[in-house]
Amino acid sequence: MAYAICTFCGNVCDDVEFDVNTQKGKKLCALGLAKFREKERIKSPMVDGKEVSYEEAIEKAVEILVSAKKPLLYGWASTVNEAIRYGVLLTEKVRGVYDQCASVCHAPGTLAVIEEGIPGGSLGAVKNRADMVIFWGSNPLEAHPRHPTRYSVMAKGFLIKNRKDRKVVVVDVRKTKSASMADKFIQIRPGYDYAIISALRALAKGEDIEADEVGGVPKEELAELAEEMKSAKYGVIFYGLGVTQSRGRDRNVENAVKLIQLLNRYTRWIIWPMRGHYNVVGAGEVPAWEVGYQYGIDFSRGYPRFSPAEFSAVEMLLRRDCDAMLVVSSDPAAHFPRKAVEHMKKIPVIQIDPFPNMTTLLSNVVIPSAVAGIEAEGNVYRMDGIVLRVKKLVDSQYWSDEKILHEMLKIVEEKLEG
Amino acid sequence: MLWIKNGIVIDPKNGIDGEKMDIFVKDGKIVEESEVNKNECQVIDANNKLVLAGGVDMHAHIAGSKINTGRTMRPEEMRIVRQTAGKLRASMGRVLLTSPAIGYEYAKIGYTTAVEAASPPIGSPHTHEELDAIPVVDKAALPVFGNWHPVFKFTAEKDREKLKAFIAWALERTKGFGVKVVNPGGVEAWMYGGNVRSLDDEVPNFGVTPREIITELVKANEELNLPHSVHLHCNNLGVPGNYQTTIETMKLVSGMKNDDRQVLHVTHVQFNAYAGSSWRDVASGAEEIAKVVNSMDNVTIDMGQPIFGHATAMTGDAPFQFTLHKLTGARWSNKDSEIEGGAGIVPIVYLPKNPVHALQWAIGLELGLLVDSDKVVLSTDYPNGGPYTEYPYIMAMLMSKRMREKELERVSPYVQKATSLAAIDVEKTLYEVVQMTRSLPARVLGLENKGHLGVGADADIAIYNINPAEVDPSAQYDVINAEFRRPVYTIKGGEVVVRDGAIVAETWGRTYWVDARKKVDMQAIDEDLNSFFEYYSVERRNYGVDDYWMRSPERLEVN
Ligand code: SF4
Ligand SMILES: [Zn+2]
């Protein structure tokens, strides 16, 4: 068994072990174990279905990117920061558009940060101090299976000696698996997050609301929740896609942040998103320091411009505004709207990924890569922004994303300057 | 090899004040004339030009989770295009800058070294990722210690040996340069919604006081003989009346001595130099602080000068940041960090007509003027007080009473009542300003090869179109203000990176870190570390930064 760091979900569990020979793991949840176990790989680099060398595939990929007017470079949530950095530099060089998976899930949270900031904390702060934990539109037991034990529900810490020291509330539109571990489950009507948060803000301030119920929740229940929140010593809201992808989107998060601002006038509260992929945070942090923005970044004028409504991948594809696409560690062909995928089929697509997926089927250039956390190392951001360096457990014939993108960047620079 | 010919050199560390001389560079170092073959040298004509060591910014927030969250929170800051992408990187930002812009903009004012002044220890891999993305300048980072539970514990137990071992462990793991302390005890109190208000308030659950934390950390730092002293952001930052806490804090080190440098550096003192009892009667406490600093031989400060215009407050002083948010209603980010402390971020704008902002502006200048030039470093606490790109403005202001009089006309008259700025006749000389931006910050940091032009120094050199024999800074403040913004040359490690105020080449500097492990018994804290990690959400084995992850680490070993 070798010490490993899991590269599946945003928990980035760093206490796990895995043996590549026996394919057995320790402490990995089922999702993590599935990620670590051998499975079908892309065998070799390919150009138009023909097996080629890495060098040939990279040459072809560079040719596509350099001759495109507006290439879209998308994905990035499931690779390491070093690779993402080369990806950002590459996008800047070819004057393309950089976008990442957040634009189809947690980007409304980023917009809310722009509106109100984010009063947050690390998962260790939650483990040590949080005596009240609310999962709002998030379902840790299914999406982040070890979150409750490691960080938020059963986790013991400095002030929290056992599960009883903590009140756990799940707010969701349906009774999820996670609701079963909660002390309280509050079922809300879909699309009423904003109204309910507004009600909580009013009630926490000591104001009355002129309704018997909001979003399917009786006023008394909301008043009780507001009171509990105010009397907690240190509370946290972990919100999920149920908040960002339902009616109101970024406004829901913004409203929740305002609730947190208010609660900090009485006691301590923080709020944090339950980010999905293991390094989706890095896919935003790296471009933020390199070029100033997290996603939806256009370089066609030689400098970065941020406009989510224009430059997020789905919008670009729907408008048929890109004439080539590089997809790194992602599967837009499986997840994007049909119309967006139709445009993908019409333009040259380059894929860098360890595993075959729907996007492989429509890619002109396919470059298989080493699996980060098993065959390649590098820095990643856990959902709370804590950096961990995922490990290389075994040598591999595959090039790492970092190496592939670095080579691509070097050749692009030669071509553009030479 | 370089031959810098006929320049007029000011080099306070070596006692040179406006001498015409040649400087020779080989392998990135300044060398004796005999070391170079003049035929092979690239000759740089510095005739009638001012030749200085590259500037050293010993306190700025240039890398890591705070500035990056700031960028994310403030896309409006990112819309200024300083340079489009070409052979060099696109360079973006108004006050908050992208990493490439940070390096370029330092070089463009002749600065060649910059220190990230507050790195959350668990965030150090992020800090180093961003430092690695900053071109040109040499760098270092100061991890924050003052609210870290192990520090509380060893302070409470009065176990100096363990505290020293812990510091050595932490510096190695974070690849840190020195001991930063931010509002000691106050950030832990914030975890319960509070703060500490005096040096003798107890930290909840630990029974220690800021007084004890500061004193023990300074003693441990001195026994370890680290290059830099404790670097302290005092308690009560931003609170009217806080100058008394600041003075009381400085006096904690009375009687302590170090032959090479101060034993305590108190940072961005402007924010901790307020007299009065509320925002209604707030006034300057700068004179009192200056008296104390000038009378002590072991304390240095930096200004924390506000610049009118946009800025972003970002500090490890999380309770202060929340207070600022409540005060201004602006956006607020907060980050509580494991058992290490916290941080916060709030946008601000300093307006000349706002009485409080004008007061802050005046206090910064008072400190710069009234404190001896070998004890006060020029800083804006970037981006808290504003951009470091305005250092030339501060330099000019310190050198010219006339410029100050002109500036005073456009600020709130409250300044006349609440500060003595208008009455201060001091005009710093060029030599003194060079001290405040070069030799002193290098000495404060303990970087022997920085901030001077003696043989053996790093060939970090800035050449300006200022002839000290002809320019009168008091009258020609415009020339000072303009020329320090466009060096004729900035040379970093012997390579020309700036020519006539524009970046011409991208180079990559080093990141210094301090290894003091030989001075302590690391085994003594092994068990303690294991128990501290019970309260972390990461494994001990995964904590920290290995030097092979870094672009260009340079280990400074303490013997
Ligand atoms: S919870 Fe997430 S990170 Fe942890 S082992 Fe499971 S999949 Fe991996
Ligand atoms: Zn600072």
Image (cartoon, helix red, strand yellow):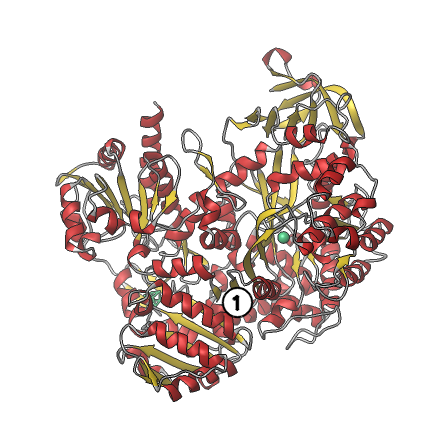
Instruction: Tell me what residue is drawn at x 55 percent, y 74 percent.
Output: A265
Question: What is the number of callouts on the image?
Answer: 1
Chain under callout 1: B
Rendered view: B199 above or below A102? below
Instruction: Give percent across and percent down for residue A18.
Output: 33, 63
Q: If the image is split into quadrants, where does the N terminus of chain B sit?
A: top right
Quarter of the figure with residue A170: bottom left
Quarter of the figure with residue B112: top right
Is the C-beta of the residue carrying label 1 under 8 Å from the nearest atom of ligand 1? no
Query: As drawn, which residue projects farthest toward the top?
Result: B39
Give, as a three-letter code, the residue at label 1.
Glu
Q: Secondary structure at mark 1?
A: loop
Instruction: Tell me what residue is drawn at x 33 percent, y 51 percent.
Output: A308
Within 10 Å of disc 1 (Cα), the crowding (few <14, some 14-19, many 20+) is: many
Left or right: residue A409 compared with residue B56: left
Quarter of the figure with residue B489: top right
Q: Nearer the viewer, residue B210 or B426?
A: B426
Left or right: residue A5 compared with residue B224: left
Instruction: Tell me what residue is drawn at x 68 percent, y 68 percent.
Output: B154
Instruction: Tell me what residue is drawn at x 24 percent, y 34 percent.
Output: A68
Rendered view: B466 above or below B556? above
Q: Nearer the viewer, residue A9 or B280?
A: B280
Asked if residue B292 can be seen in this view, the reply is: yes
Instruction: Give percent across and percent down for residue B49.
Output: 69, 21
Left or right: residue B225 compared with residue A356: right
Instruction: Give percent across and percent down for residue A368.
Output: 23, 46
Instruction: Give percent across and percent down for residue B401.
Output: 78, 37
Asked if residue B549 can be seen in this view, the reply is: no
Query: Which residue has dot 1 on it?
Result: B338
Q: Nearer the viewer, residue A310 or B526?
A: A310
